[in-house]
Image (cartoon, rainbow, N blue to C red):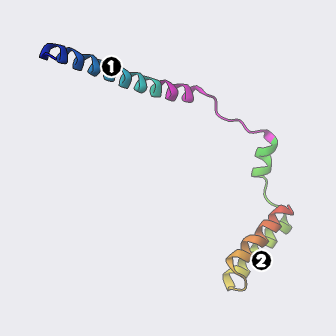
Amino acid sequence: MDAPAVQAYQWVVWMIGVSVFAAVIGLVIAAIVRARRRPAELHSAAERLQREAPPPPEVDAGLRALSLQKQKGQISEEEYEKRRAEILAGR
């Protein structure tokens, strides 16, 4: 091969590489713009009220008593988590 043919081949390979790189960057930017235009996920009013509603007094009292037992070392962390889940599930 002579030098001019190799040089032309290198330029072609370089241009293809730059073009592919630019296309990938463009696709990433387009995906980001499209994701920003997507509306925020809207939750139902019932879900929001359930999340914001204070727990019933008996649930609150049960959680406080359970926390006190844990602080005094009467129950382990695993037992605390298990009982806490039971109290909240009974809500």
Vertical position of residue 23 compared to residue 55: above or below: above
Q: Which residue is mark 2?
A: 65
Vertical position of residue 44 compared to residue 65: above or below: above
Percent across and percent down for residue 1 are 16, 17
Instruction: Give the label, 2 or 1, closer to the camera.
Output: 1
Question: Going by the image, does 78 lie left or right of 19?
Answer: right
Of 29 and 21, which appears nearest the observer? 21
| Stretch of the chain drawn in magenta | 30-45
Of 89 and 60, which appears nearest the observer? 89
User: Quarter-wise, where is residue 71 in the image?
Assistant: bottom right
Question: Going by the image, does 44 lie left or right of 3?
Answer: right
> Which residue is rendered at x = 50% and y = 29% of the image?
32
Q: Secondary structure at mark 1?
A: helix
Vertical position of residue 51 compared to residue 45: above or below: below
Q: Amino acid at mark 2?
A: Ala
Percent across and percent down for residue 64 are 75, 73
Residue at the extreme front of the image, as rendered:
1
Of 82 and 71, which appears nearest the observer? 82
Say few, some or many: other residues with alpha carbon within 10 Å of mark 1 (under 14 / 14 to 19 / 20 or more). Answer: few
In reply to whether residue 2 is colored magenta, the answer given is no
**Mark toward the start of the polypeptide (2 vs 1):** 1
Q: CA distance from mark 2 to mark 1?
A: 69 Å
In reply to whether residue 37 is colored magenta, the answer given is yes
Q: Amino acid at mark 1?
A: Ile
Question: Going by the image, does 45 lie left or right of 8?
Answer: right
Q: Which residue is mark 1?
A: 16
Question: Going by the image, does 73 lie left or right of 28?
Answer: right
Q: Secondary structure at mark 2?
A: helix
> Which residue is rendered at x = 82% and y = 67% of the image?
87
> In the rendered view of the protein, which quadrant contains the C terminus?
bottom right
